[in-house]
Image (cartoon, coloured by chain):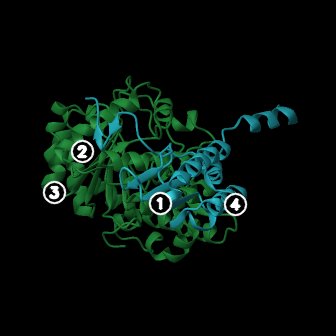
Chain colours: A cyan, B green
Amino acid sequence: MATQSSKIENMRNLPARGSEKLMKAWKARTLTDESVREIADALDKSPAKLENFNIVGGENATGIEVSLRYDGDDGPWCGNDIQFWLQWLLKHGSHGVVVTPPHIIINGTPWPEVITVKLNFGQTGPTETGGALPGVTGGEVSGG
Amino acid sequence: MGNISPTGIAPVLQVHPTRRCNLLCDHCYSMSGPAAREDLPTEILCACLGDAFDLGYRQLAVSGGEPLLYKQLPDLLTRGRQLGMLNTVTTNGMLITESRWDQLVPLVDVLAVSIDGREPEHDRIRRQDGAFARTVANLQVIRTSGVPFGFIFTLTQFNVDSLEFVVRLARETGARSVQVHPLTLHGRAALTMLGARPDGIELVAAILEAVRLGEELGVPVTVDALSIQQLLAYRGHIVPTRPIRRLVDVAPVLVVEPDGSVTPLTHEVNRGLKLGSLMNARLSSLASKWLAEGFGDRLADACASTWAELSSSDSMSAVYWFDEVAARTN
Protein backbone atom coordinates (compact mmCIF):
# COMPACT_ATOMS: atom_id res chain seq x y z
CA MET A 1 0.00 0.00 0.00
CA ALA A 2 1.33 3.41 -0.93
CA THR A 3 2.39 5.64 1.94
CA GLN A 4 1.51 9.33 2.11
CA SER A 5 5.05 10.32 1.19
CA SER A 6 5.22 7.94 -1.77
CA LYS A 7 1.89 9.32 -3.02
CA ILE A 8 3.29 12.85 -2.82
CA GLU A 9 6.44 11.67 -4.59
CA ASN A 10 4.34 10.11 -7.36
CA MET A 11 2.39 13.34 -7.76
CA ARG A 12 5.67 15.25 -8.04
CA ASN A 13 6.81 12.89 -10.79
CA LEU A 14 3.68 13.40 -12.91
CA PRO A 15 4.38 15.30 -16.10
CA ALA A 16 2.92 18.80 -16.18
CA ARG A 17 -0.48 19.29 -17.76
CA GLY A 18 -0.34 20.60 -21.31
CA SER A 19 -2.48 23.58 -20.30
CA GLU A 20 -0.05 24.47 -17.49
CA LYS A 21 2.87 24.47 -19.93
CA LEU A 22 0.79 26.54 -22.32
CA MET A 23 0.01 29.09 -19.59
CA LYS A 24 3.63 29.20 -18.48
CA ALA A 25 4.78 29.89 -22.01
CA TRP A 26 2.23 32.67 -22.35
CA LYS A 27 3.25 34.26 -19.07
CA ALA A 28 6.92 34.06 -20.03
CA ARG A 29 6.13 36.00 -23.16
CA THR A 30 4.16 38.73 -21.40
CA LEU A 31 6.10 41.94 -20.93
CA THR A 32 6.53 43.17 -17.35
CA ASP A 33 5.69 46.73 -16.26
CA GLU A 34 9.37 47.28 -15.54
CA SER A 35 10.50 46.22 -18.99
CA VAL A 36 7.93 48.49 -20.66
CA ARG A 37 8.92 51.43 -18.42
CA GLU A 38 12.57 51.00 -19.44
CA ILE A 39 11.58 51.27 -23.10
CA ALA A 40 9.53 54.39 -22.38
CA ASP A 41 12.43 56.01 -20.46
CA ALA A 42 14.89 55.24 -23.25
CA LEU A 43 12.56 56.75 -25.84
CA ASP A 44 12.17 59.87 -23.69
CA LYS A 45 15.94 60.33 -23.62
CA SER A 46 16.37 59.75 -27.33
CA PRO A 47 16.21 62.72 -29.69
CA ALA A 48 14.51 60.45 -32.24
CA LYS A 49 10.95 61.11 -33.36
CA LEU A 50 8.60 58.24 -32.70
CA GLU A 51 7.17 57.41 -36.11
CA ASN A 52 5.31 54.31 -35.11
CA PHE A 53 4.58 52.49 -31.85
CA ASN A 54 2.68 49.23 -31.72
CA ILE A 55 1.86 47.06 -28.74
CA VAL A 56 1.39 43.41 -29.68
CA GLY A 57 -0.88 41.25 -27.53
CA GLY A 58 -3.26 43.89 -26.19
CA GLU A 59 -3.82 43.87 -22.44
CA ASN A 60 -1.27 41.11 -21.88
CA ALA A 61 1.34 42.62 -24.15
CA THR A 62 3.97 40.23 -25.46
CA GLY A 63 5.89 42.68 -27.59
CA ILE A 64 6.42 46.26 -28.72
CA GLU A 65 7.36 47.46 -32.16
CA VAL A 66 8.84 50.94 -32.49
CA SER A 67 9.95 52.93 -35.48
CA LEU A 68 12.32 55.83 -34.74
CA ARG A 69 13.38 58.68 -37.01
CA TYR A 70 16.64 60.57 -36.57
CA ASP A 71 17.06 63.83 -38.46
CA GLY A 72 20.39 65.40 -39.42
CA ASP A 73 22.82 65.68 -36.51
CA ASP A 74 20.73 63.31 -34.36
CA GLY A 75 21.75 60.43 -36.63
CA PRO A 76 24.63 59.07 -34.53
CA TRP A 77 22.28 58.69 -31.53
CA CYS A 78 20.69 55.69 -33.21
CA GLY A 79 23.72 53.69 -32.04
CA ASN A 80 22.79 54.48 -28.42
CA ASP A 81 19.21 53.26 -28.97
CA ILE A 82 20.38 50.07 -30.62
CA GLN A 83 22.73 49.52 -27.69
CA PHE A 84 19.78 50.01 -25.32
CA TRP A 85 17.77 47.46 -27.38
CA LEU A 86 20.58 44.90 -27.02
CA GLN A 87 20.88 45.54 -23.27
CA TRP A 88 17.11 45.21 -22.91
CA LEU A 89 17.21 41.82 -24.65
CA LEU A 90 20.08 40.67 -22.45
CA LYS A 91 18.25 41.76 -19.30
CA HIS A 92 14.76 40.53 -20.11
CA GLY A 93 15.58 37.62 -22.36
CA SER A 94 14.34 37.03 -25.85
CA HIS A 95 10.85 36.05 -24.57
CA GLY A 96 11.06 32.83 -26.54
CA VAL A 97 11.15 34.57 -29.90
CA VAL A 98 13.42 34.57 -32.86
CA VAL A 99 15.26 37.87 -32.41
CA THR A 100 15.06 39.98 -35.52
CA PRO A 101 17.88 42.52 -36.01
CA PRO A 102 17.02 46.21 -36.20
CA HIS A 103 15.76 47.38 -39.55
CA ILE A 104 17.80 50.46 -40.52
CA ILE A 105 17.12 52.76 -43.45
CA ILE A 106 19.63 55.52 -44.19
CA ASN A 107 18.47 58.31 -46.45
CA GLY A 108 21.22 60.51 -47.88
CA THR A 109 24.85 59.74 -48.72
CA PRO A 110 27.56 60.43 -47.88
CA TRP A 111 25.91 62.57 -45.18
CA PRO A 112 22.74 60.94 -43.86
CA GLU A 113 19.82 63.35 -43.65
CA VAL A 114 17.35 60.91 -42.17
CA ILE A 115 17.87 57.56 -40.45
CA THR A 116 14.93 55.30 -39.66
CA VAL A 117 15.36 52.44 -37.19
CA LYS A 118 12.74 49.80 -36.46
CA LEU A 119 13.18 47.85 -33.23
CA ASN A 120 11.18 44.89 -31.89
CA PHE A 121 11.04 44.22 -28.15
CA GLY A 122 9.66 40.87 -26.95
CA GLN A 123 7.40 38.71 -29.05
CA THR A 124 6.01 40.45 -32.08
CA GLY A 125 6.20 37.46 -34.43
CA PRO A 126 6.41 33.66 -34.30
CA THR A 127 7.91 31.89 -31.29
CA GLU A 128 11.01 29.74 -31.48
CA THR A 129 8.93 26.62 -30.85
CA GLY A 130 6.70 27.44 -33.74
CA GLY A 131 9.29 28.83 -36.07
CA ALA A 132 11.47 27.08 -38.60
CA LEU A 133 10.99 23.33 -38.66
CA PRO A 134 13.60 20.64 -39.17
CA GLY A 135 13.67 19.64 -42.80
CA VAL A 136 11.22 22.34 -43.83
CA THR A 137 12.42 25.52 -45.44
CA GLY A 138 10.44 28.05 -47.37
CA GLY A 139 7.39 25.85 -47.47
CA GLU A 140 9.30 22.98 -49.11
CA VAL A 141 9.88 19.67 -47.44
CA SER A 142 13.39 18.34 -47.74
CA GLY A 143 14.37 14.69 -47.84
CA GLY A 144 12.70 11.97 -49.80
CA MET B 1 -30.79 14.04 -37.51
CA GLY B 2 -31.12 13.11 -41.19
CA ASN B 3 -27.86 12.45 -42.94
CA ILE B 4 -25.88 14.92 -40.88
CA SER B 5 -23.95 13.87 -37.78
CA PRO B 6 -23.37 15.99 -34.65
CA THR B 7 -20.11 17.13 -36.19
CA GLY B 8 -22.00 18.48 -39.17
CA ILE B 9 -20.62 15.93 -41.60
CA ALA B 10 -22.17 13.00 -43.41
CA PRO B 11 -22.58 9.82 -41.33
CA VAL B 12 -19.29 7.96 -41.25
CA LEU B 13 -18.50 4.32 -41.75
CA GLN B 14 -15.19 3.91 -39.96
CA VAL B 15 -13.42 0.82 -41.26
CA HIS B 16 -10.38 -0.75 -39.64
CA PRO B 17 -9.60 -3.49 -42.17
CA THR B 18 -6.36 -4.70 -40.62
CA ARG B 19 -4.40 -4.78 -37.41
CA ARG B 20 -1.14 -4.91 -39.31
CA CYS B 21 1.03 -1.90 -38.64
CA ASN B 22 4.66 -0.94 -39.08
CA LEU B 23 4.54 0.75 -35.66
CA LEU B 24 3.66 -0.25 -32.11
CA CYS B 25 2.32 3.05 -30.82
CA ASP B 26 1.62 3.62 -27.13
CA HIS B 27 -1.65 5.40 -27.90
CA CYS B 28 -3.03 2.79 -30.30
CA TYR B 29 -6.76 2.26 -29.75
CA SER B 30 -6.39 -1.30 -31.04
CA MET B 31 -3.65 -3.83 -30.58
CA SER B 32 -2.10 -3.19 -33.96
CA GLY B 33 1.55 -3.84 -34.64
CA PRO B 34 4.13 -5.56 -36.85
CA ALA B 35 3.27 -8.99 -35.43
CA ALA B 36 -0.51 -8.65 -35.88
CA ARG B 37 -2.00 -10.57 -38.79
CA GLU B 38 -5.75 -9.93 -38.54
CA ASP B 39 -7.30 -8.82 -41.85
CA LEU B 40 -10.92 -8.51 -42.92
CA PRO B 41 -11.75 -10.14 -46.28
CA THR B 42 -12.41 -7.52 -48.95
CA GLU B 43 -15.58 -9.24 -50.19
CA ILE B 44 -17.13 -8.85 -46.75
CA LEU B 45 -16.08 -5.21 -46.53
CA CYS B 46 -17.31 -4.35 -50.02
CA ALA B 47 -20.70 -5.86 -49.22
CA CYS B 48 -20.68 -3.89 -45.96
CA LEU B 49 -20.02 -0.66 -47.87
CA GLY B 50 -23.04 -1.24 -50.10
CA ASP B 51 -25.25 -1.91 -47.12
CA ALA B 52 -23.86 1.08 -45.24
CA PHE B 53 -24.58 3.35 -48.19
CA ASP B 54 -28.18 2.08 -48.30
CA LEU B 55 -28.43 2.81 -44.57
CA GLY B 56 -27.37 6.43 -45.12
CA TYR B 57 -23.61 6.39 -44.50
CA ARG B 58 -21.88 8.70 -46.94
CA GLN B 59 -18.28 8.86 -45.74
CA LEU B 60 -15.86 5.93 -45.76
CA ALA B 61 -13.06 6.50 -43.24
CA VAL B 62 -10.38 3.84 -43.49
CA SER B 63 -7.90 3.48 -40.68
CA GLY B 64 -6.24 0.52 -39.03
CA GLY B 65 -3.68 -0.70 -38.14
CA GLU B 66 -1.88 1.02 -40.95
CA PRO B 67 -4.31 1.00 -43.89
CA LEU B 68 -1.49 1.10 -46.43
CA LEU B 69 -0.57 -2.41 -45.27
CA TYR B 70 -4.03 -3.68 -46.23
CA LYS B 71 -3.30 -5.10 -49.68
CA GLN B 72 -6.87 -4.72 -50.92
CA LEU B 73 -7.12 -1.05 -49.95
CA PRO B 74 -7.49 0.04 -53.61
CA ASP B 75 -10.40 -2.40 -54.05
CA LEU B 76 -12.09 -1.10 -50.94
CA LEU B 77 -11.70 2.52 -51.98
CA THR B 78 -12.84 1.71 -55.50
CA ARG B 79 -16.07 0.32 -54.06
CA GLY B 80 -16.52 3.46 -52.00
CA ARG B 81 -15.91 5.57 -55.09
CA GLN B 82 -18.46 3.53 -57.11
CA LEU B 83 -21.04 4.18 -54.42
CA GLY B 84 -20.27 7.90 -54.40
CA MET B 85 -18.96 7.93 -50.84
CA LEU B 86 -16.37 10.41 -49.63
CA ASN B 87 -13.19 8.35 -49.24
CA THR B 88 -10.87 9.31 -46.41
CA VAL B 89 -7.80 7.43 -45.18
CA THR B 90 -5.91 7.90 -41.93
CA THR B 91 -2.24 6.90 -41.97
CA ASN B 92 0.96 7.32 -40.02
CA GLY B 93 2.46 8.49 -43.32
CA MET B 94 5.67 6.48 -43.05
CA LEU B 95 4.90 4.12 -45.92
CA ILE B 96 3.79 6.66 -48.50
CA THR B 97 6.32 6.05 -51.23
CA GLU B 98 5.57 7.33 -54.73
CA SER B 99 4.85 3.88 -56.14
CA ARG B 100 2.52 2.96 -53.30
CA TRP B 101 0.75 6.31 -53.32
CA ASP B 102 0.28 6.58 -57.09
CA GLN B 103 -2.31 3.82 -57.22
CA LEU B 104 -4.31 5.43 -54.39
CA VAL B 105 -4.29 9.00 -55.67
CA PRO B 106 -7.45 8.73 -57.82
CA LEU B 107 -9.30 6.96 -54.99
CA VAL B 108 -8.62 9.15 -51.95
CA ASP B 109 -10.62 12.34 -51.37
CA VAL B 110 -8.86 13.37 -48.16
CA LEU B 111 -5.82 11.91 -46.44
CA ALA B 112 -5.29 12.35 -42.70
CA VAL B 113 -1.72 12.03 -41.45
CA SER B 114 -1.05 11.50 -37.76
CA ILE B 115 1.34 14.01 -36.22
CA ASP B 116 1.59 13.92 -32.44
CA GLY B 117 3.80 16.88 -31.61
CA ARG B 118 7.42 17.82 -31.98
CA GLU B 119 9.88 15.22 -33.25
CA PRO B 120 10.92 13.75 -29.86
CA GLU B 121 7.30 13.52 -28.61
CA HIS B 122 6.08 12.01 -31.86
CA ASP B 123 8.89 9.43 -31.95
CA ARG B 124 8.45 8.59 -28.26
CA ILE B 125 4.70 7.90 -28.46
CA ARG B 126 5.28 5.89 -31.65
CA ARG B 127 8.22 4.02 -30.12
CA GLN B 128 10.23 4.60 -33.27
CA ASP B 129 13.19 6.90 -33.72
CA GLY B 130 13.01 8.66 -37.06
CA ALA B 131 9.24 8.23 -37.42
CA PHE B 132 8.61 11.97 -37.48
CA ALA B 133 11.35 12.70 -40.01
CA ARG B 134 10.13 9.97 -42.34
CA THR B 135 6.51 11.10 -42.18
CA VAL B 136 7.36 14.75 -42.75
CA ALA B 137 9.61 13.85 -45.68
CA ASN B 138 6.78 11.83 -47.25
CA LEU B 139 4.40 14.80 -47.10
CA GLN B 140 6.11 16.02 -50.24
CA VAL B 141 4.84 12.96 -52.13
CA ILE B 142 1.28 13.66 -51.01
CA ARG B 143 1.49 17.35 -51.75
CA THR B 144 2.88 16.78 -55.22
CA SER B 145 -0.04 14.45 -55.99
CA GLY B 146 -2.54 17.21 -55.23
CA VAL B 147 -4.63 15.07 -52.88
CA PRO B 148 -5.89 17.27 -50.02
CA PHE B 149 -4.38 16.23 -46.72
CA GLY B 150 -4.63 17.24 -43.09
CA PHE B 151 -3.08 16.28 -39.77
CA ILE B 152 -4.59 14.39 -36.87
CA PHE B 153 -3.14 15.25 -33.47
CA THR B 154 -3.89 12.97 -30.52
CA LEU B 155 -4.56 15.15 -27.49
CA THR B 156 -3.40 13.81 -24.13
CA GLN B 157 -3.39 15.30 -20.65
CA PHE B 158 0.13 16.57 -21.28
CA ASN B 159 0.51 17.88 -24.82
CA VAL B 160 -1.87 20.72 -25.71
CA ASP B 161 1.17 23.01 -25.71
CA SER B 162 2.44 21.10 -28.76
CA LEU B 163 -0.59 21.95 -30.84
CA GLU B 164 0.94 25.21 -32.04
CA PHE B 165 3.91 23.35 -33.46
CA VAL B 166 1.61 20.96 -35.33
CA VAL B 167 -0.53 23.76 -36.76
CA ARG B 168 2.57 25.65 -37.91
CA LEU B 169 3.85 22.46 -39.49
CA ALA B 170 0.51 22.13 -41.26
CA ARG B 171 0.82 25.64 -42.62
CA GLU B 172 4.39 25.15 -43.78
CA THR B 173 3.80 21.78 -45.44
CA GLY B 174 0.48 22.54 -47.11
CA ALA B 175 -1.80 20.49 -44.86
CA ARG B 176 -5.28 21.98 -45.09
CA SER B 177 -6.49 21.36 -41.56
CA VAL B 178 -5.64 19.92 -38.17
CA GLN B 179 -8.03 17.66 -36.30
CA VAL B 180 -7.47 17.30 -32.57
CA HIS B 181 -8.67 13.93 -31.37
CA PRO B 182 -8.71 13.20 -27.63
CA LEU B 183 -6.89 10.04 -26.55
CA THR B 184 -9.24 7.17 -25.74
CA LEU B 185 -8.10 4.50 -23.34
CA HIS B 186 -8.85 1.53 -25.53
CA GLY B 187 -6.62 -1.20 -26.93
CA ARG B 188 -2.93 -0.74 -26.13
CA ALA B 189 -3.54 2.78 -24.86
CA ALA B 190 -5.51 1.31 -21.95
CA LEU B 191 -2.35 -0.48 -20.84
CA THR B 192 0.31 2.08 -21.62
CA MET B 193 -1.30 5.49 -21.22
CA LEU B 194 -3.32 5.34 -18.03
CA GLY B 195 -3.73 8.82 -16.64
CA ALA B 196 -3.07 10.44 -20.01
CA ARG B 197 -6.67 10.82 -21.16
CA PRO B 198 -7.31 14.59 -21.35
CA ASP B 199 -9.75 15.94 -18.79
CA GLY B 200 -12.20 18.81 -19.26
CA ILE B 201 -9.58 21.47 -18.59
CA GLU B 202 -7.26 20.16 -21.28
CA LEU B 203 -10.17 19.88 -23.71
CA VAL B 204 -11.11 23.51 -23.07
CA ALA B 205 -7.49 24.55 -23.51
CA ALA B 206 -7.45 22.68 -26.82
CA ILE B 207 -10.66 24.38 -27.97
CA LEU B 208 -9.26 27.82 -27.10
CA GLU B 209 -5.92 27.07 -28.74
CA ALA B 210 -7.72 25.79 -31.82
CA VAL B 211 -9.59 29.08 -32.17
CA ARG B 212 -6.46 31.16 -31.57
CA LEU B 213 -4.23 29.19 -33.92
CA GLY B 214 -6.91 28.98 -36.58
CA GLU B 215 -7.30 32.75 -36.61
CA GLU B 216 -3.59 33.49 -36.33
CA LEU B 217 -2.27 30.98 -38.85
CA GLY B 218 -5.22 30.55 -41.18
CA VAL B 219 -5.33 26.76 -40.80
CA PRO B 220 -8.71 25.34 -39.70
CA VAL B 221 -8.27 23.46 -36.42
CA THR B 222 -11.12 21.31 -35.12
CA VAL B 223 -11.33 19.59 -31.76
CA ASP B 224 -13.43 16.47 -31.28
CA ALA B 225 -14.95 17.88 -28.11
CA LEU B 226 -17.96 19.89 -27.04
CA SER B 227 -17.90 22.80 -24.64
CA ILE B 228 -20.66 23.05 -22.03
CA GLN B 229 -22.24 25.83 -24.06
CA GLN B 230 -22.32 23.67 -27.18
CA LEU B 231 -23.68 20.76 -25.21
CA LEU B 232 -26.53 22.87 -23.88
CA ALA B 233 -27.24 24.56 -27.19
CA TYR B 234 -27.23 21.50 -29.42
CA ARG B 235 -29.12 18.87 -27.48
CA GLY B 236 -31.34 18.28 -30.48
CA HIS B 237 -28.31 17.38 -32.58
CA ILE B 238 -26.60 15.02 -30.18
CA VAL B 239 -29.47 13.31 -28.37
CA PRO B 240 -31.55 11.28 -30.82
CA THR B 241 -35.32 11.21 -30.46
CA ARG B 242 -36.97 7.90 -29.64
CA PRO B 243 -38.21 5.70 -31.15
CA ILE B 244 -35.12 5.09 -33.24
CA ARG B 245 -36.10 3.87 -36.68
CA ARG B 246 -32.86 4.40 -38.61
CA LEU B 247 -29.35 3.37 -37.58
CA VAL B 248 -27.78 6.66 -38.71
CA ASP B 249 -30.05 8.59 -36.35
CA VAL B 250 -28.43 7.05 -33.27
CA ALA B 251 -25.07 6.01 -34.72
CA PRO B 252 -23.71 8.76 -36.99
CA VAL B 253 -20.42 6.91 -36.73
CA LEU B 254 -20.31 3.16 -37.24
CA VAL B 255 -17.07 1.33 -36.46
CA VAL B 256 -16.05 -1.86 -38.27
CA GLU B 257 -13.15 -3.58 -36.52
CA PRO B 258 -10.60 -6.00 -38.02
CA ASP B 259 -12.42 -9.01 -36.50
CA GLY B 260 -15.62 -7.96 -38.30
CA SER B 261 -17.44 -6.64 -35.26
CA VAL B 262 -19.62 -3.57 -35.80
CA THR B 263 -19.94 -1.00 -33.04
CA PRO B 264 -21.97 2.21 -32.93
CA LEU B 265 -20.22 5.55 -32.20
CA THR B 266 -16.84 4.45 -30.86
CA HIS B 267 -14.76 1.41 -29.91
CA GLU B 268 -15.52 1.87 -26.24
CA VAL B 269 -19.28 1.32 -26.37
CA ASN B 270 -20.31 -1.66 -24.29
CA ARG B 271 -19.99 -4.98 -26.10
CA GLY B 272 -23.65 -5.64 -25.38
CA LEU B 273 -24.58 -2.78 -27.71
CA LYS B 274 -22.53 -4.01 -30.65
CA LEU B 275 -24.50 -4.82 -33.77
CA GLY B 276 -22.68 -8.14 -34.21
CA SER B 277 -20.07 -9.45 -36.60
CA LEU B 278 -19.86 -9.18 -40.38
CA MET B 279 -18.36 -12.67 -40.27
CA ASN B 280 -21.81 -13.97 -39.31
CA ALA B 281 -24.23 -11.71 -41.20
CA ARG B 282 -24.38 -8.76 -43.54
CA LEU B 283 -24.60 -5.26 -42.14
CA SER B 284 -28.16 -4.81 -43.42
CA SER B 285 -29.30 -7.84 -41.40
CA LEU B 286 -27.33 -6.85 -38.32
CA ALA B 287 -28.80 -3.34 -38.42
CA SER B 288 -32.41 -4.52 -38.85
CA LYS B 289 -32.11 -7.01 -35.99
CA TRP B 290 -30.37 -4.50 -33.75
CA LEU B 291 -33.09 -1.90 -34.25
CA ALA B 292 -35.90 -4.46 -33.93
CA GLU B 293 -34.52 -5.65 -30.61
CA GLY B 294 -34.53 -2.13 -29.21
CA PHE B 295 -30.79 -1.52 -29.04
CA GLY B 296 -31.19 1.76 -30.89
CA ASP B 297 -33.51 3.02 -28.19
CA ARG B 298 -31.11 1.82 -25.49
CA LEU B 299 -28.28 3.77 -27.07
CA ALA B 300 -30.56 6.80 -27.42
CA ASP B 301 -31.35 6.48 -23.70
CA ALA B 302 -27.64 6.41 -22.95
CA CYS B 303 -27.22 9.62 -24.97
CA ALA B 304 -30.12 11.25 -23.11
CA SER B 305 -28.84 10.27 -19.66
CA THR B 306 -25.31 11.36 -20.60
CA TRP B 307 -26.63 14.75 -21.68
CA ALA B 308 -28.72 15.12 -18.53
CA GLU B 309 -25.82 14.23 -16.27
CA LEU B 310 -23.27 16.41 -18.02
CA SER B 311 -25.53 19.42 -18.43
CA SER B 312 -26.28 19.49 -14.70
CA SER B 313 -22.66 19.07 -13.66
CA ASP B 314 -20.94 22.08 -12.10
CA SER B 315 -17.41 20.99 -12.82
CA MET B 316 -17.68 19.93 -16.43
CA SER B 317 -16.07 22.31 -18.89
CA ALA B 318 -15.77 20.31 -22.14
CA VAL B 319 -16.22 16.69 -23.10
CA TYR B 320 -15.47 14.17 -25.80
CA TRP B 321 -19.12 13.28 -26.36
CA PHE B 322 -18.78 9.76 -27.79
CA ASP B 323 -16.44 8.75 -24.97
CA GLU B 324 -18.89 10.04 -22.38
CA VAL B 325 -21.79 8.17 -23.94
CA ALA B 326 -19.68 5.02 -24.21
CA ALA B 327 -18.77 5.26 -20.52
CA ARG B 328 -22.48 5.28 -19.67
CA THR B 329 -23.20 2.17 -21.70
CA ASN B 330 -20.99 0.08 -19.40
State the residue at coordinates (16%, 59%): B84
SS for tag 3?
A: helix
Report x, y in % for residue B139: 28, 39
Q: Earlier in the sequence, mark 2 or mark 3?
A: 2
Q: Which residue is mark 1?
A: A72
Residue type of the residue flagged with mark 3 = Leu
Q: Chain of mark 2?
A: B
Foreground mark, 3 or 4? 4
Report x, y in % for residue B164: 48, 49
In this orientation, does residue A89 appear?
yes
In this orientation, does residue A123 appear?
no
Instruction: Look at the picture and state if B243 lies above or below B148.
Output: below
Residue type of the residue flagged with mark 4 = Arg
Measure how far apart labels 3 and 4 are at the Cα level: 67 Å
State the residue at coordinates (41%, 41%): A132
Measure how far apart labels 4 and 1 are at the Cα level: 28 Å
Q: Chain of mark 1?
A: A
Residues at marks 4 and 1 on the same chain: yes
> Quadrant location of residue A40?
bottom right
Q: Which residue is mark 2?
A: B45
Q: Which residue is mark 4?
A: A37
Residues at marks 2 and 3 on the same chain: yes
SS for tag 4?
A: helix
Residues at marks 3 and 4 on the same chain: no
Circles 2 and 3, Cβ within 8 Å, touching? The answer is no
Foreground mark, 1 or 3? 1
